[in-house]
Amino acid sequence: MAQDILQQVEVIIKKTFDNDDVSITLETTADDVDEWDSMTHLELIDAIEKHFKVRFALGELQSLKNIGDMIKLILKKTSP
Amino acid sequence: MKFIKIFFLTAVLVTSILFGFVLSIDPYNKLGINVFNFATKAVDFPRVNKFNMLEHSKKNYEAFIIGSSAANRYPTKVVKDITGLETFNYAVQSATPEDYYAIFNHITHRSHPKLVILSFDFYGLNKFFPVEDMLLISPLKKYLNDVDFEEQKNLGPYKTYFTLEALGDSYKVVWVNLFGHANHSFLENGDYFKEPPAVPPIKISQFPYPPFEFDSNRLELCKKLKKKADDLGVKLIVFTSPLSYEHWERIAKNPELLKNLEDYKIKLANIFGGVYDFTNKGAKNFNDIKYFGDSTHPSVYFSEMILKRLLKPEEMDGEFGRFVSGGVP
Amino acid sequence: MLFNSFAFIFCFLPVTLAGFFVFNKFDKNQFAKCWLVGASLFFYCFWTLKNLPIIMTLLAVNYFLGRELHSLQPRWPKGILLKLGLIFNIGILCFFKYANFFNDISGSPFELGKLLLPLGLSFLVLQQITYLMDAYEGMSKPRGLLDYLVFGTFFPYLIAGPITHYEELVPQLENKENFKFSPDRFSLGIYIFTMGLAKKVLLAESFASWANTGFEESASLHFFAAWKASLAYTFQLYFDFSGYSEMALGIGQMLNLELPINFNSPFKSKSIIEFWTRWHMSLSRFITTYMFTPIVRLMPSITFTNSMVATFLAMLIVGVWHGAGWTFTVYGGMHGLALVINHIWKKKRKKKKPIPFFGWFLTFNFVNITFVMFRATSLENALQVYKAMLGLNGVVIAKIFGLSKESALIKSGWKLGSMLKPDDYLVLILLVAAFVLILKAKNIPELSKSFKPTTKTAVFCAMIFSLCLFGFNRITDFIYFNF
């Protein structure tokens, strides 16, 4: 399940950052990706929210700069 | 737990050692301790330095220049060339009449000077301008025994030895005594080290008034000084320390302050039997960094000019440096 | 009571720590928390009693709002409660911070009297906003009044941050392990505290006097003097504020509590975007989360242009948060503009690798220049310093390296200054030391990760600490107490 989400997130990241060379793992953080800063972060979140049909709280946004935490949160929000 | 114990023990130990070090050096001569028998202390303080320079000098000085830092740059050579007297510059920073008096006592106690040139600062008669702390902890203080003045309770950073400044100064004392030849920031004869002209525009930052109010104790002190000079047969030339035109203008904007300035000249003239006035709008002709380093400190070049005018008054013309005679009620 | 005072280090802190651990030892955790609240209030009142009612009102209102926001059946819709809370908090802050300013510029006939900003209010208000937001978004668990009070008054961060979230602090007070005195964490606390203390007492205060003189005499500064003043202030601000934050972190460690890191070697940044992820991080986090993001989300779509507008607005608000006055507004605007330019450039640059040194050089100097605006007492004051930094007031070079009147520099219009004095050497040495520290040295969060309570470290710490004690007699406030 997590692996599946990871793959979908990777696709979104590549598209949002317009960079096909990015590869991500559960350990990847915003610091590892050059294009990922506070500005593009919001575009990414927006894309992820639309894709998974979830809504993140403002207080959660900072922890989303870590792929592992992001996947966990998506899982939590999408599970019925 | 070991870390915490070692931390506290070492902290107590190091603090004691550092404080003990400062006390053993006693950099401001507050305690009269001199464990290592150092020749000089408090390396940056002219009241100590010049005192010691004079004490240890083999020359027989017959003329002295007294004043605040504004008088630092009067070259002793000019006085010697004109009068033939061996001259010493005894200017100390932020001098007030207490300093003039202590210094006068020191030099007359040591030898019999023939001439004393006193650059008298306007601020020095201001009741609100305090005696410099350093005077009270310098060896000059012993020449103030007959003076009653309100001792400053707050000695600023010097009030306690438990400061980084005291630590730094102690280190400097050791360094100068062990590794440097106890050198001073002054050249022989108390002359100021040569410095190039200052930076335009002339700074006005040193403007310690208002408020201004005449200090009657200090006026009495000046009378005492004059009497001693007369008794000992010392020729005393007094002049008001030059102020830049900007400085004078600022005073002139305040009518009350301007009146104080004029009164100050008259009071001095009455006490000293005349005074040369370098504190007036005549400064306009010398309104350039060639003449003034900042609003209160004349340059070396200008200091020379002023000395020559003082010692050859017959060549003096114009308002700047005019003689204000005494006897005006 | 400042952290760098005898009263704090030798009376307040030992008593507070001892009380906390004694209560915990006898399993009176609730008493230990009460003790912390009491100590914190005492700490606050040590400055002035006058502001206590304001602080208590603020805490009381926020506590009740928070309780409603946490509850499953609130009496009013949560959206309305949150809005009320935000209006209340921001209203109080604006009232105390800006009433005087608007009174001054509008010349209104109402005499408000000189309102003084209650100490620490700027930080307290931001922290309370995070509390309400977290409660509203379900990011925090409801707990009792006592936990809230510990969070709201905790003395290490009460006056100047770091802005800490409720969930970052309070759960630590539930962990049984944290009730016990831990020699290792206490040692780490001493270490961090001492390093922060040294930054403040030995470095910041040395730079302070040069910065003050420079800005006071801004009209007569020349080229080198102006750079000296501006660099001195930049270092003063950094060492002062990061020193304070780290002292807070250190005290937290002594109490077994972890606080968020506020500075992460900001001057190693190679772009202004990076700088804001490393400088005053708890504030940056607040801005990004609660200002930048909502502004962007309010806009119809997330486009690059919209994000740029939001960035600029958020930075402008940060500027004004520091104080009413044009200098702070311009300061915020400068940083907003720089971030926008940085983002545009980053977008255009694409794959090309930037040159690290160039990026660092630009970033450092830009920050240094904006701090002139930050420090200046007025726009005019700042312009005077800028003029001098550009060399428009002339260049005076010290008599070194065999410079004489005949050398080319002097002939080209430079003026020859005096010989270097001992104080000038001290300036040079400290400036070099500061550069080495900010660029090469590990920062305190990094150092604390590799910290080992060895004898060598203990002796080193103790020596620095002893030296700092000698600096206590020239106490000046921390810069960020004024914001």
Image (tube, rainbow, N blue to C red):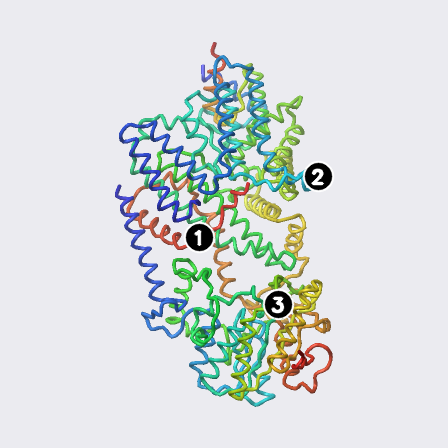
- Near-viewer residue (B43 or B47): B47
Give the farthest residue toward the front: B329
Q: Is residue B235 above or below residue B4?
A: below
- Between C438 and C294, the residue placed more toward the observer is C294
Name the residue nearer the viewer: B175 or B14: B14
Q: Amino acid at mark 1?
A: Leu
Q: State which tag comes first along the sequence, 1 or 3.
A: 1
The quarter holding residue C17 reads top left
Residue positioned 49% across, 34% down in the render: C163
- Across and down, in percent, residue C482 comes to 54, 43
| Residue on which disc 1 sits | C202
Residue topped by disc 2: C109
Q: Report which residue position mark 3 lands on.
A: C416
Q: Would residue C278 be seen by someone viewing this image from the given angle? A: no
Gap between marks 1 and 3 measured at Cα = 32 Å
Name the residue: 45% across, 39% down. Answer: C45
Residue at image position (60%, 45%) is C374
Image height of B21 relative to C324, above or below: below
Give the residue drawn at x 51%, y 83%.
B228
In the displayed structure, C464 sits above or below B22; it is: above
